[in-house]
Amino acid sequence: MKGKFTFALALLLFVSAAGFAQLPKVSGGGSIGNLVTQFTNSIKPASFLSSWTGAKGNFLSTAGKVKDAVGVGKSIASLAGFIKPEMFKQGFNVQNLISTANTVKTMSAATGLLKNLEGGLKPEAFMSGWAGKRTGWLNALNLIK
């Protein structure tokens, strides 16, 4: 009986450690602002409109400090507006996402919109390393309440 308990405990610890190993390494403990910044930095520079060049520094500084749903919504709306229209999948309604993002009230709605934005972008909009980070980023995003 003691052997089964030890095995079950070891298995539980392994599964827990394996789950945490997939979470992205973000400075600041994985706050929503850091996840927005990490996502933004995973988009290829060529996927942005030329106006992004002058706005990038201010956006990243502001987005990295976001801690509430309203701030996340505003960051999502702003970010979506800087992405070239051809980088979105066919049928994805960017204007609807921006309108909804500007009215977000809950963190659940904000994280859902961020996932929606990520899912609405074509794979070629992202840096090559995004595919390897995506699962961990989504897992970390799911932990935000």
Image (cartoon, helix red, strand yellow):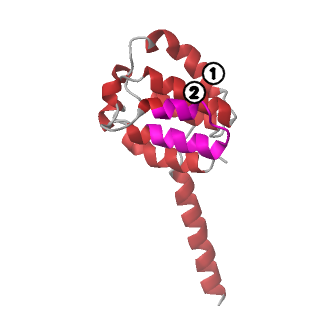
What residue did someone put label 1 on?
62
Q: Magenta stretch: residue 106 in it?
A: yes
Mark 1 residue element:
helix
What residue did someone put label 2 on?
75
x and y percentages locating residue 114 in the rendered image: 52, 39
Q: Which residue is pictured at 57% across the width and 50% down the height?
A: 142
Where does the N terminus fall, quadrant-wise? bottom right
Above/below status of 62 relative to 126: above
- For this orientation, the residue located farthest to the top is 54
Q: Are marks 1 and 2 in contact (CB under 8 Å)?
A: yes
x and y percentages locating residue 116 in the rendered image: 47, 42
**Is 31 in front, or is 101?**
101
Type of the residue with mark 1: Thr
Q: Which residue is pictured at 49% across the width and 25% down the height?
A: 79
Query: Does the magenta stretch mainly form a helix, a strand or a loop?
Result: helix
Q: Is residue 15 left or right of residue 49?
A: right
Mark 2 residue element:
helix
For label 2, count other residues whose C-alpha is less than 10 Å away and answer few (under 14), some (14-19) or many (20+): many
Write the start and end of the magenta stretch as one range: 96-117
Above/below status of 116 relative to 40: below
x and y percentages locating residue 130 in the rendered image: 40, 38
Q: Is residue 40 left or right of residue 131?
A: right
For residue 85, what is the image quadrant? top left
x and y percentages locating residue 140 in the rendered image: 57, 47
Q: CA distance from mark 1 to mark 2?
A: 8 Å
Above/below status of 55 relative to 139: above
| First reached walking from the N terminus: tag 1 or tag 2 | 1
**Is 131 in front, or is 101?**
101
Q: Which residue is pictured at 51% across the width and 44% down the height?
A: 137
Type of the residue with mark 2: Ser
